Image: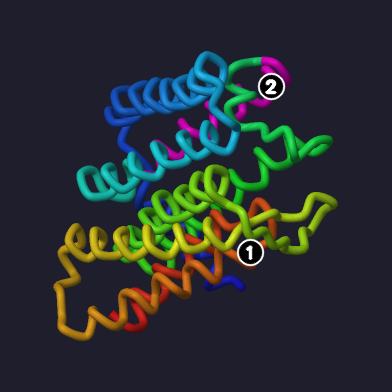
Amino acid sequence: MELAADRIISFFVDNFPSTGTLFTMGPLGFCWSMACLYFAGYLKRQHGWKTGYSRKTFHFLTFISVAFIQTRFGTPGVCLFGGMSSLVVLISILLGDGNILYEALAREKDAPHRTYYIVAPYVATLIGGLFGNIVFGEAALFGYLAAGVGDAAGEVIGTRYGKHIYKVKAMRSVAAIRSWEGSAGVCVMCLLSLIAAVWLSPSFSYKESYLILLPLIALTCALVEAFSPHGWDNATMQIVPAALAVLVL
């Protein structure tokens, strides 16, 4: 336990942004995250998008931003952007029902636990991101893209085309309602995400074996997303692909 605690503390110390970065990149990260969430809320309020779409718009933009920041500015930049995004989500929760920021994230079907299912997925996102970086290092990028693109595609495709429904038992009273169409979308988009992660990661290069391994990892990710408790797939969908990238790629 002490070794794990020391490793976590060292991670934050080593990756704490410089003062200059805090005062330059911090406000930029906050404004960008706020713009992403407002855009998602605008699409819901002004164009009638379902919450499944608006929520995943913010989800997708956030994870793609993190992937870009990771490759351009490294882990300190990711930590800073994570803090700014957390502040934006907190503001949306404090503003509450009816506010455009809150409504972009709060699913109607999650009532009366709408706020919980904003907080839980975001906490899961932070846990998955931190665990991936601390334990798997550069391979955390595989988790960012799989969760940001694959998981987002699952809800969007499931919301639009999902006809064959199944439920997953939740840790609280709201069960996860998913569809086979959505899970198929997760698999396909995870595969594309994994291909992109290999291309973006300097420590990985394509091998013939990837023609088999990448589809198998994508299928595993789809199964993980399918059976993750409602609200917590943002953690599992980051940890599993990062772990598999280290273990088998």
Residue 173 part of the magenta-drawn span:
no
Asked if marks 1 and 2 touch (Cβ < 8 Å), the reply is: no
Please say if 163 is above or below 33.
below
**Residue 240: where, in percent of width, then height?**
47, 70
Q: To which quarter of the image does residue 62 belong?
A: top left
Mark number for residue 188? none
- Quarter of the picture holding the N terminus: bottom right
Which residue has dot 2 on it? 94
The residue drawn where x is 61% and y is 54% is: 163
Q: Residue furthest front?
A: 163
Mark number for residue 228? 1
The residue drawn where x is 29% and y is 60% is: 192
**Residue 98: where, in percent of width, then height?**
70, 16
Q: Is residue 202 left or right of residue 230?
A: left
Does label 1 or label 2 sit earlier along the sequence? 2
Secondary structure type for disc 2: helix
**Residue 83: where, in percent of width, then height?**
48, 36
Amino acid under disc 2: Leu
Q: Is residue 213 left or right of residue 231?
A: left
| Chain part drawn in magenta | 78-98
